[in-house]
Amino acid sequence: MNTQSIDNGYDCWLNYKYIEEDRLRNSYVESCAQITVIGESAVMQSARRELSLALTSMLGKAPESGSFPVSDSGIVAGTFGSSPVFDELAREYVIDELGDEGYVIRAMDNDRLYLAAATDKGVLYAVFHFIRLLQTGESIEGLRVRQVPGNGLRMINHWDNMDGSIERGYAGNSIFYRDGEFVGDKGRIRDYARLLASGAINAVSINNVNVHQQESKLITKQFLPEVAIVADIFGDYGIRLYLSVNFASPIEIGGLDTADPLAPEVSEWWMRAARDIYRYVPDFGGFVVKADSEFRPGPFTYGRNHADGANMIADALEPFGGEVIWRCFVYNCLQDWRDRKTDRARAAYDHFTPLDGQFRDNVLLQIKNGPMDFQVREPVSPLFGGLKRTNQLLELQITQEYTGQQRHLCYLVPQWKEVFDFDTHARGQGSTVAETASGRLFGRKRGGIAAVTNIGDDANWTGHVLAQANWYGYSRLAWDAGLSSEQIALEWIRMTFGQEPGLESVILEMLMSSYGIYEDYTAPLGVGWMVNPGHHYGPNVDGYEYSKWGTYHYADCHGLGVDRSIRSGTGYAGQYHYPVAATYESPESCPDELLLFFHHVPYTHMLKSGKTVIQHIYDTHFGGAERAANLIAQWDSIAEKIDGQTYRETRERLVHQAEHAGEWRDLVNTYFYRKSGIADELGRLIY
Amino acid sequence: MNTQSIDNGYDCWLNYKYIEEDRLRNSYVESCAQITVIGESAVMQSARRELSLALTSMLGKAPESGSFPVSDSGIVAGTFGSSPVFDELAREYVIDELGDEGYVIRAMDNDRLYLAAATDKGVLYAVFHFIRLLQTGESIEGLRVRQVPGNGLRMINHWDNMDGSIERGYAGNSIFYRDGEFVGDKGRIRDYARLLASGAINAVSINNVNVHQQESKLITKQFLPEVAIVADIFGDYGIRLYLSVNFASPIEIGGLDTADPLAPEVSEWWMRAARDIYRYVPDFGGFVVKADSEFRPGPFTYGRNHADGANMIADALEPFGGEVIWRCFVYNCLQDWRDRKTDRARAAYDHFTPLDGQFRDNVLLQIKNGPMDFQVREPVSPLFGGLKRTNQLLELQITQEYTGQQRHLCYLVPQWKEVFDFDTHARGQGSTVAETASGRLFGRKRGGIAAVTNIGDDANWTGHVLAQANWYGYSRLAWDAGLSSEQIALEWIRMTFGQEPGLESVILEMLMSSYGIYEDYTAPLGVGWMVNPGHHYGPNVDGYEYSKWGTYHYADCHGLGVDRSIRSGTGYAGQYHYPVAATYESPESCPDELLLFFHHVPYTHMLKSGKTVIQHIYDTHFGGAERAANLIAQWDSIAEKIDGQTYRETRERLVHQAEHAGEWRDLVNTYFYRKSGIADELGRLIY
């Protein structure tokens, strides 16, 4: 037993623990005594360094470095064509189908293990894959792995500001910036790039989509030399760097008097800006743009549409191979709570489907998973399946803005799985979000997934150590949405804490139950927004009820929920294809967990579960808080198996969660009891 | 008509307009052609300067400066005994009864006008009084004025921080500090002192009662030289300077490891601190202390009581004639909303009455007007009348924290009058707060009134020009609580805008109706706290309902209000003397406007007005918002008579108020309609 299993959490899942079990370790040592990594590019050097580090740590002995021509046994990693040694493998696989990022891992020729790909990046991914096999105790005998990513773009978005703060960050300050400048020591950025690469992340945007004054200058010569340094660090790990830009840049930093996308001087300005950027950062990925949203400037200012805006910038980037990632989070944020006709949930679809087919090939529309804003429970955005001739990018939120802010345990992979698996029926059954976002469904070359990161400069990156599972899980799903939540959790547990059966089952149970627990004691039946305004932490049932943000539940003494049906409501349900629209349209067929999102019903409405709405609220809140409290006992049961600091820090958060879940329970139950006047059937304490 | 009547509002009510009406002006000119002010102290020079400025401006001609021996006609101002010329007057009045601050104004000996007092300060007050007579068009023939202040201490509290911000400030930044230092140019402070002196304010504390790190150092040699400069400026106008201090100063700036009031090293530290202060500021007034309140340190930390804490500091100041002003705003601010037994309203009484008689003579307990915190409507604090052997200081809030933040018009003098006139019955009928706070009721030498100012560095001092009336009115009431709200308003209107009958009646009506209007569309029946947390602006019915601040209304689908009766509630009503306690104890005898403060009643409870509670809520909110909207028309009706800038700036605020009153109306009505399910009898629009 190793109580120093994860130290302070800095290494995350790349915690290369010495494999104590002799038989297992020896089985690895045989195949890994010698490594040969062919090629000297920066990416290939990263691969070689990582493989050597992992084997040395886990097997207790540095592998011999093989040289050309390679010896008969050991690991040989490289690109097809870099050595005749891969020729046989190349005959077996269709290299074109592997693409730029796919790879194979193959035991052949007795004791040889081949890690091969068409590109250096593919080899790096193969190396991390192979390391994972060792970390999770998999057999490597007769290995025959072929992997191709499910998404072309697998991106991380940072909402970091140059003053060092992070919008919606719950794990310290930015690792990129401090006091309006880039940090001097880039060591942590390098460590971060390595962690991203281990999950095959291939794109990162490093500043907040709300681009303030200082950040607007990131695309100017004032900051481009530093941007280039950071881009190089990511480049060493096969990751392209993107920047969020201010749509009004031509005015704010360019000195023009307009940012009209159809004004020639504006497009010229962006072209010059692109030229400057690529001079410093030849492999620059492109721009992320939040326009006409929550007081950000955009094409609407000039009477233009979002295709006008995105295409103009896309044309500037196109000659250099850059992309525009254009966010669809566009809605009226000055709504009147008295107005029950306007529906924020409709906004993205209403704004963007009329433009379908009008965007350039190097534009991707980044669409949040739900129509609102990363609530605990939302339906999937109808834009997936609504757009057919436009590149899409699914946006998820790893940082736990509405899901406990890394003080509550909430393993989000099950939520994301539901999104990926949601069938839009855009081309009949099987038209899942995984198929539409990737571009496969409509045969589009670009597509993928982006997510707002949950990391900061806390020693363990994510504040709550167990929140690292969300970071890890996101990258695994981005690669392969077919993986199960359990499998991802198990990998992460083993890689982070080591192979320890007692510990494994407990943490797995904690992770797998956590999203359900959090939903139970917070947001009943898809209602959403019952949080404190601004910081979004803690219960406040009316917190957003009379606001300008389009976020209401309309609870009165009779019932609650938002009528979004076609027949009598806002018509939002009609944005889905048949039969989804029909399912949501009627309270009878609408799934319980989304009932209040789509319908206003009495407290006495009977759910499919056989409970009334009000009793469901009481039961889930009492039950959820109780299960939250039980997490402490679960964690305590493995105290001996966890590093002391990690045990204590995590326990503190679990204790806070239990207490705070009690506050959620009491406040929500009291609110609805006071409002409905209906007593709990079980007579439990409501205030 | 003079449309430049108040310029940008900077001169406030010391707006010495030329008196256009010939007959009136000439009647003044006769008596004021020559002025003789006897004495050369700084205060006397202020008096001479002011008199000369006022007469020159209003009469259009500088008065001749008289000299010794004075001529037969004109104004003669000075202290008794400073010249034989006052001897006859001195025989007529009992100078001892005038005290340090009283004065007489007397026409005698044909054309002579005497302004006389026992002290220079009294003379200065006489001068301002005389000027006011001219500004308001009073006849000065046969004048016979004798004035003695109703309160010994008439204080202004500043909640200014040294970074320049003002806690609960709504009129710009501090006039004292910027960026952690005193401002360089002290001119505005001098202008401010003059305005205070015109209202006979005699004490000012210049920093926030929440004393942060930098402000803790105000009592050290780092800042005392500057404090002395500011104290001198105020001293020139007869005003003593006080500082708010941090109870933990011995630790935070003294390097001790305790602030225990019974530790000898702590009291020695305060004695040394006092010595230092008085070396720089010989007339220093003393300290204001907020201890054990809202996370401020205090004697409770050391298991001591507030008498221990206050007396220890008082002993350090006593040799120099200084005072300790100890705030009674002490309560549990980490309350549990589930706990209906703990009652914040009880806190001040419960904490301080057991200590009655234990405080030093140079300690004054500063008591907020109500038991909560400056709500629109509260009962009067039962500490008035509860304390019999302790000096008291009534604390009011001029700055409109809960009453519209100087964006809504709310003339507060009527509210304050109700406080002064409230009969505690502590020594039978007639034991008003005016009598207890002043010290008269129990024969105590010290007593008085303090208030948190509403001024900042806005050009017109108070943001909303009409809010100057609250500042002015406060000082007038502090001097003489017997003045009526109308009289004070009329004085202020005439002094500020000039004598203009059409204008006068309109502004008077606006001011006099404003508190009722504001109460109507915000806080029904004494309920309080239905505001947004933190900044306290705008409606939020549940804003403080589930908080830790002890601020609840317990609204459910049946009714609302807090049961504070003795029989079934928190017992707060029992903190009052008979018959007040009995009146509040029963819903039948409790005045409507405080019903929900003292009782939890059904929405269908019938008020004395003949309306149900719910209908009262609807009616007052519809009516209040309508009357708020009417203020614009009232203001517009005198547009021609008001300086353009003042007209426009004030109108903007009135327009905002009308709109915001509509938001209050809709939100509060909707909240209670949704909760009660009871429709408005008149079928008006509720959402």
Image (cartoon, coloured by chain):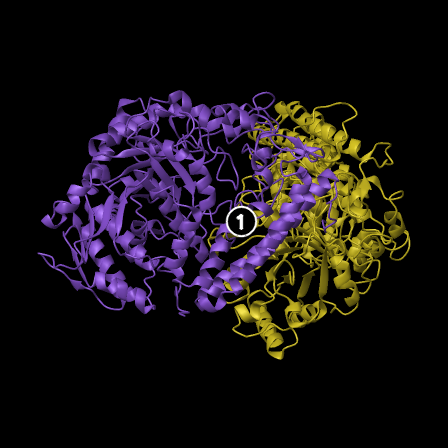
Chain colours: A purple, B yellow
Residue ID at (33%, 31%): A439
Q: Amino acid at mark 1?
A: Ile
- In-front residue for pair A416/A46: A416
Question: Residue A50 appears in which quarter of the rendering?
Answer: bottom left
Query: Which chain is indicated by disc 1?
Result: B
- In-front residue for pair B446/B546: B546
With A514 as the anchor, is B203 left or right in this view?
A: right
| Image location of residue B252, percent across then percent down | 53, 68
| Image location of residue B430, percent across then percent down | 88, 51
Residue ID at (41%, 33%): A433
Residue A442 seen in the current view: yes
- In-front residue for pair A463/B432: A463
Count the labels in the image.
1
Does residue B239 sit above or below A258 in this rendering?
Answer: below
Residue B222 seen in the current view: no
Instruction: Say which residue label 1 marks.
Output: B175
